Image (cartoon, rainbow, N blue to C red):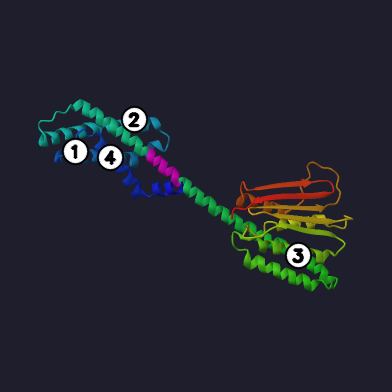
Amino acid sequence: MDSVQRLFSNRLLRSILFWGMLMGFVLVIDDTTTFSFGKILNAAILLFFYWLVVNINYQYLIPRFLNKKKLAFYGLLLIIVAGILAPLRSALFVIITEIFDSSAHYDFGEGVAGVFLTLIIVSLVSAGLKIFSDWLTYTRDKSEMDKQNMQSELKFLRSQVNPHFLFNTLNSLYALTLKKSDQAPEIVIKLSEMMRYMLYECNEAYVPLQKEINYLKNYIELERLRHGSHIDIKLNITGEVTQQRIAPLLFIPFIENSFKHGISKKIDDGFVHVDLRIGHDEIALQVENSKAPVLPNPERKISGGIGLVNVKRRLKLIYPELHELEITDAPHKFNIQLTLELNS
């Protein structure tokens, strides 16, 4: 499809293709096998009339009538143009034939009808090629614009991830420093490693999966340091990491959301369980966390703020038709299952 678009978007190639086809058509309809100067001149004049009707079609009839869906006016004017040019072409043919081959017989009426028909056919074929070319150009431009808009939106969405996470983490670090906790320096180190990844290593569209996993490990270890051993925090990773690549910062909103809502003073036995299964070209993430019991309310929105809204949008943009996301909001736990087919 791309090669066809390039062919029809190049005006020179379009012209060579079209007029080459017409030249072949002129040669095919000539019922003789010998060529004289008169026949070559007649063929050149015929091509000139084809060129004339095509340019009238392109410059005037198509933009003013066909493109505006005035089909009746377009058809009527096309017939009028062909009706004017056909007798002129036939008259020139008669003159040239008499000059170079006086013995040849030419039926003027049949000749006018034949030229009229070929002019109509050439006009319609040229209109079809013009419409097809314009459609390809529109499709290419729209695709390029959609791609640029998507890249701009992705950059905006990714820019939201960093301050959102940083805000939550710094709040936790601030709480530990107020308590003069010995864990604060270790948290600073973990946070610095994570920030290095966020600022310098994930500026590409896709990053090595191993780096993304290391980032998640640091985050979960940071949460362990924050909450201590009395919280049930598990990370289980199965499968082999090789050369897989993934969009950066894609999993962290799910995990961050699980800690935000799964560990609270209102929950006696808080837990966060993260299971990551890695295949050659597929990744499955399951995140399950406890939650405070609430009264049933069918109109209540699923928990999670900008993080989950952001990541859902990113999944639609980066992995369209390549992901499945299931969210289960039960009375005492919240479960997310994401299956992702890797496309890079």
Residue 19, percent from left and from top: 29, 43
Tell me: 93 left or right of 166. Answer: left
Numbered tag placed on residue 24 in the rendering = 4
Give the residue type at disc 2.
Leu
Numbered tag placed on residue 76 in the rendering = 2
Give the residue type at disc 4.
Gly
Q: Secondary structure at mark 1?
A: helix
Q: Earlier in the sequence, mark 1 or mark 3?
A: 1
**Alpha carbon separation for disc pair 3 and 4:** 73 Å
| Residue receiving disc 1 | 42
Indicate the quadrant containing the C terminus: top left, top right, bottom left or bottom right.
bottom right
Q: Earlier in the sequence, mark 2 or mark 4?
A: 4
In the image, which is nearer the foreground, mark 1 or mark 2?
A: 1
Give the residue type at disc 3.
Thr
**Alpha carbon separation for disc pair 1 and 2:** 28 Å
Q: Is residue 301 visible?
A: no
